Image: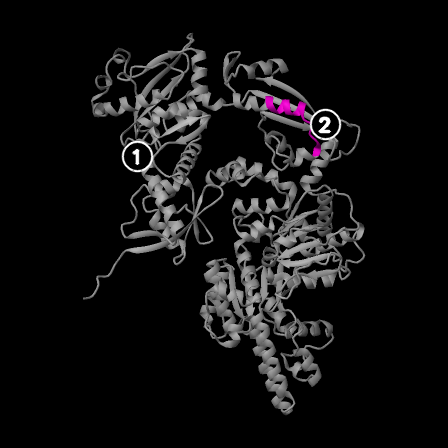
Amino acid sequence: MTQPLSITKEFPLNVHPLENGHFRLASITVPAEKWVPSLYLNHRESFFGLNAQIEDNALIASPVELVELFSRKMHPFTVFDGVNDDSNNWLDIFKETAKVWATPDLWNFINIEENELNVTAPITDKGQTLLVNAVKQKLFQAGLSMEDVEALIPFFQRGGWPIKSQTTHPSLLVALRLSEPEAMEDTWLLETVVRGKKSSVYWTPAYRKKSLAISEALPDKWSEFSDYIEETQSKIFSLISSIDRINTETFYSSTLTDEEVRMFLRDDLVKLQALGFEVVLPAWLKAVKDTKMRVKTVAKTANSYKTTAGLNEILQFNWSFSLNGQEISADEFQQMVTENRSFIQAGNEWFRIDSAWMHEVRELIRKSEDENWTVKELLFREIPEELALALDDDEETDVDPLFAFEMQKSLQTIMTQLSEKKGFPAVEISPNLLTTLRPYQQQGLEWLVFMRNEKFGACLADDMGLGKTVQLIAYLLHVHENTEQPTPSLIICPTSVLGNWQKEIAKFAPSLKVQTHYGSSRTKEIDLTSDVVLTTFGTAMQDIESLTEITWTSVTLDEAQNIKNMHTKQSRAIRKLTGGHHIALTGTPVENRLSELWSIFDFIHKGYLGSFRKFQENYIALIERDNSDATKHKLRLKIQPFLLRRTKQDPELLLNLPEKLEQREYCALTTEQAALYESLIQETVSKLDTLTGFEKKGLILKMLSKLKQLCNHPALYLKEPFDDAEDMLERSEKLAQIVTLAGEIAARGEQCLIFTQYIGMGHLLQHCLTELYEIDAPFLTGSMPKNQRDHLVEAFQAKEFPVFLLSLKAGGTGLNLTAASHVLHADRWWNPAVENQATDRAYRIGQTNFVHVHKFITIGTIEEKIDKLLVEKQALSEELIHSSQWITEMSDNDIKELLTLSI
């Protein structure tokens, strides 16, 4: 008998707890975007999963999300199971904790001891920890501190949990209104008021009805809502500590003294608003806020006669205070802080001042007197935000600040130098650097040397193509030539650019002694007489125990975003390395998630941004959840001294750059490619001696095409179907480098052209870009109809897609593609004129962008050898170097030398 078809979907999940209390949930068989919507089916708070945090095909869920998700109805035809016992155990914990979270008795299971939550619910220890974290997170989201909680427990027990807006009635709104004293009066009025949801006018009973029960005082249209009004009023006054217990059966209306108003505003207002109740205040009171207290300090160094300040000089602070424009003494300020005043009258006006802020200022004054802050600490230490704001000279405002910070001229000078990255001590360029640095590259060298001398890590984040590599090479020459160093400098890079580093150092600084620590045959020992050790992220992770035994002269991460995920073994291992100076090179330091920024900074200057949990509380939550501009501003000021970032759009740099930069991108063969390459060469060379001249030319040209396809990818050479994109990238470093570069260009909002001679290579690039980056890259070939071709060109120029693939013959002439700022040559035509024609699709009249040309070359193969021949034989006429015909005219010995694999 045929079994009925099941419509239930089962999703096996791998559940892993993270250090910050969150959890990582991933399906081993289904992409996250397929199963996450089912989990968030009834979660309105995240717009049903649209705001869910998905990283590396996994859901990162907070404690609150988990208890909310598992306390609601799941998708009726969806089942979530664990892939192993541990994951099943966590899913059971989520479910049991969610039941407690959703029960009205939750706050009967919670008590507070020494400002900490304790759970007595009958669930496992892990479930209790999850519940505590969820409750704390929910309180934090509402703006409530642990100090508020004890007084709120009765409110929560009476149905005020989970925290949500209390104004949910469909027809009317119940609020509390505070009115200022009438003329010739000295008392305020606090009363319960009501308004219809579609009205802006508040209603309260006439004076003669104030003493009536709520049901009797209401107009007929609202009489059915009397129970709701009474219940809401009862909830409001259960939260107010500054007013004695009241009769909630009548509309509340009472006069308050100035002192009672001050206490209400100080102790109860924030609490009521945080819990979703509406409080109506006088318009002037809301507008004044915290505006009339002013504090000013002037910082100077002890040696104020100096024209420039040193980073280690001790600062002195002079403080002054004013209230409503009138100066007050330090003793008067101290008295106001001691009295904890937050609502005061000056002349005929009332002003509200932030008592918590005044306590912070008093603590700041105490610290400035008790601790010897130096100029260096003012820049880089975790000091109060008010002083850090002095470093930001970019924003001007007409608003009179609450806190004014001034510096003497010599101190201001050094602050300006560091904020603008100018005026550092000059660094003499080594005569062994075989290139000329551009002015901004010289500035980068001086900054790196300065940061090393001051023992601060550095993140060189110049845009792609501005020469981060040559700046670091100049730095390494300076460091290793000017002082004797006991250990080498370590450079860690992706495998795909290891060859680039080998070539660039050999080209620009051949005097540096380099050890390449890579490959299965590598020795585990490091040659300490080397100047530079080159290795890859993967190798460094494998050999981390031996690498951490050395205190390196410097440790540099190229493409530092490779450690962006702090939880991976690779990232954790790399961050254990120690050196005299830590440097990160990256073109995308802060554009992505803030957790990635923390990981990079944890490497370059450990501890500067604090623990990840602290960073999450102080920055990530406020920026990624609340989009807080103030917190973004604070973080930018904090990282700015460590970060040197220049882009091609910088007008100062464009004056010093060529309009077109051509760069060779070197890639190594994989083991599979090298074996196939050797086999093909041996087979071909053995036939050369037996062929006539015409036959020999045909064999060489056929072999050249095979070799070029093999250098692109072994699957093209073997005519194999495509596997998963990640597996395909592992078989070819060139493919990995091209796809990664194109993805980065698109992520920055730029556009690129990719030229290839081979249809198969174009389809492979399409496959990888779609699967890994969700980039739909059209492929223009010779068989494409003209109207379709014209449509794609117009769409690319209109920035409708970021990556355009073109066959070299079909796209090499006649097209205007000036929207592109990058041109990638996946495989070489070996005719400079043909390549230049292709490049000129982007680099032509109408182009306003700097054009960066990338020519990909596989190290040690025929690609590299012919590239060198073309450079050496620039005098050859274009007729002689037509296509690849000139290669067939070479002698047998020259051809054999050309074909030999030299890696």
Q: Is residue 372 magenta?
A: yes
Q: Which residue occupies the foreground of this view, 882 or 529?
A: 529
Q: The N terminus appears in which quarter of the rendering?
A: bottom left
Q: Is residue 642 above or below residue 141?
A: below
- Res. 819 visible in picture: no
Q: Which mark is residue 694?
A: none
What's the colour scheme? one colour
- The secondary structure that most of the magenta stretch takes on is helix
Q: The C terminus appears in which quarter of the rendering?
A: bottom right
Q: Residue furthest top?
A: 184
- Tell me the residue that label 1 is attached to: 103
**Residue at left offset 38%, top offset 54%:** 83
Residue 686 shown left or right of residue 126 in the figure: right
Residue 529 occupies quadrant:
bottom right
Mark 1 or 2, which is nearer the eye?
A: 1
Which secondary structure, mark 1? Answer: loop
Sequence-first tag of 1 and 2: 1
Q: Is residue 752 above or below residue 35?
A: below
Q: Which residues are magenta?
A: 362-375
- Amino acid, disc 2: Lys
Residues at circles 1 and 2 in contact by the CB criterion of under 8 Å: no
Residue 75 shown left or right of residue 700 in the figure: left
